[in-house]
Amino acid sequence: MASYHSQKRLNLRGRDGHEETVAKADVTLADIARGVKSPGTYATNSFGKHSLLSTINVVRAVIAAAAQPTAGKLADIFGRVELLVFSVVCYTVGTIIEAAATNIGTFCAGSVIYQIGYTIVILLVEIIVADITTARSRLFFSYIPALPFIINAWITGDIQASATKHITWNWGIGMWAIIYPVCALPLIISLSWVGIRDKVRERGLFAHVSQSLRSANPFAETPGGNAFVRLAKFSNELFWALDGIGIILIIAVFGLILAPLTLAGGSAGGVPPKWGSAGIIAPLVVGVCCIPVFVFWELRAPVPLVPFRFMKDRAVWAPIGIAIFLNFAWTMQADFLFTVLQVAFDFSVKSTSRIALLYSFVSVIVGTCLGVIVFKVRRLKPFIIAGTCLFMVAFGLLIHFRGSVDASSSVRAGVIGAQVVLGFAGGLFPYTTQASLQIQVPHEKMAVLTGIFLAMYNIGSALGYSVAGAMWTQLLPDELEKRLAPINATLAQQAYGKPLDFIVAYPVGTPERTAVIGGYQHIQRLLTITGISLCVPLIIFAILNRNVYLTDEQSLVKDSDVSSDEETATEHVAAEKK
């Protein structure tokens, strides 16, 4: 099957450099706004449901995993600019719903819609970069859209501190419904200006279904036949082209298995765990039963969501393995980081925001510099291996400092230092791994596999949020009750459900706060130990990846030359020997 992006790649290559620069600059501008918005912690705290933060994150990650490969197909059918506009609308509507939410259910619904918009624009940006760069320069230009994180790491703290002081969390989220569309508008205009919209409509994807889709499109300029019939035909073709059944099954598998793990725990105050309840058992059973159904369907689907035939190539499955375990491990330490920094280490809102974004800040700086180095040395694998090893070292530091019962200034400095090391490692291998996958597949297959790669990132996040949430809800309530029992056992529920309110009433130095700090740091130690164990398969996958020589071509495997898996493997071996 021709990939859904192969023949609709952005036609910026060969045009004047000004147009390409404008597109990259506008992508960067949109990312400035996209990277600052940080909902969740304050919202769940205000509802007294702080522990459900993991559940919301699991749902968002699962939706993102299903949306990634779907978004690329939609871009081919409707056009890139149209899909970008749709993503901005979803982002804006989701943000408005989040801001207006008065309960956790409404907030979760808004988060899902917001995540769809966020996910779509992420994929579009990555594909745009891959379309206009060579294998040799891919890594450097992949970091161009991420450069705003260098700014966001420092302004986010001020914005959040000011928002929590002068306005409610609702407006702190809601203002981005205005800011983000304004920042995205130049990108939409520039993409239209360079003629991408016309190019997309001129070229076809899904050779075996695209023609029927276009003829059935009820919005076609010169339609024929009854409008209702065309709409029905178009909807049917679109459903199969997007693998609607596969999308439903993948959401069922991960959503029904992972979300209940974050909900089954008890809560401080004597509420027992819910593992025996039908509300937990039923979705788990259905989710597990959906796994073989999903595999069976994908192996026989006319347009599969997951192209299993590519998965036997280590140029594909090794990077995908890295993507899963990278986010699985990273999320173990990041899920409740914002809360832990304030409760256990007494950082201010401004400092907490900056520390939480240190990973992004350092990784973007390191990654951009690495892009220049890779352009010279023309290799990726050594940096991927070095990055995964340093990632494990960073988790060792996290275990030592976040798991410490001492909250002295030296330990606080150690917490910051560990985040810096983690960010340095993050600059060496995540984007490098993505570039490695993109350049080792035919460019006509690049988009679909990039979508799968990014989907696996989200699956890793979903796994991490689920495990971290399960550990948090299962272990923290009992730990808080045990430590607060000699002082005031009734405070355990507040410390668990509304920790950000609790720390205002009980500052550092009070017996109550000391007991809670001990409980939070105990859980953090367990989370980071789990994270370091996940670094082992991460390193193994890095070693198993290919060490290819980068050229000035867009891909190391030519589209027209690849007719079989054997020929693809032959070209990979040749690239490794250079």
Image (tube, rainbow, N blue to C red):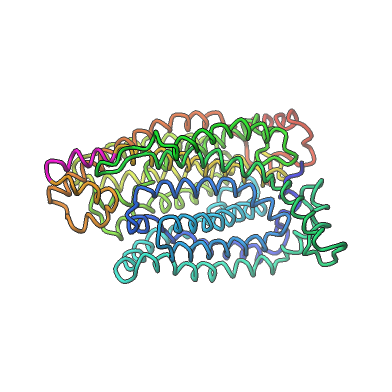
As displayed, is residue 443 above or below residue 529? below
Check if residue 447 falls in the magenta segment: no
Helix, strand or loop for the magenta stretch, by majority: helix
Q: Which residues are magenta?
A: 476-487
Q: Is residue 109 visible?
A: yes
Q: Is residue 29 visible?
A: no
Q: Between residue 312 and residue 276, name the one nearer to us.
A: 276
Q: For the C terminus, give its image quadrant.
A: top right
As displayed, is residue 186 above or below residue 554? below
- In x, y percent, where is residue 207? 81, 47
In the displayed structure image, the side of residue 65 where residue 171 appears, left or right: left
In the displayed structure image, the side of residue 329 where residue 200 appears, left or right: right
> Which residue shows up at 67% across the image and 31% down it?
296
Q: Between residue 186 and residue 554, name the one nearer to us.
A: 186
Q: Between residue 369 and residue 229, name the one nearer to us.
A: 229
Q: Between residue 161 and residue 479, name the one nearer to us.
A: 479
Q: For the N terminus, give its image quadrant.
A: top right
- In x, y percent, where is residue 484? 17, 43
The number of callouts visible is: 0
As displayed, is residue 367 above or below residue 385? below
Q: Quadrant of residue 571?
A: top right
Check if residue 480 falls in the magenta segment: yes
As displayed, is residue 430 above or below residue 202? above
> Which residue shows up at 59% across the image and 40% down it?
250
> Which residue shows up at 67% across the image and 63% down it?
81
- In x, y percent, where is residue 454? 57, 45
- In x, y percent, where is residue 238? 73, 51
Residue found at the far right of this picture: 224
In the displayed structure image, the side of residue 70 where residue 460 appears, left or right: left
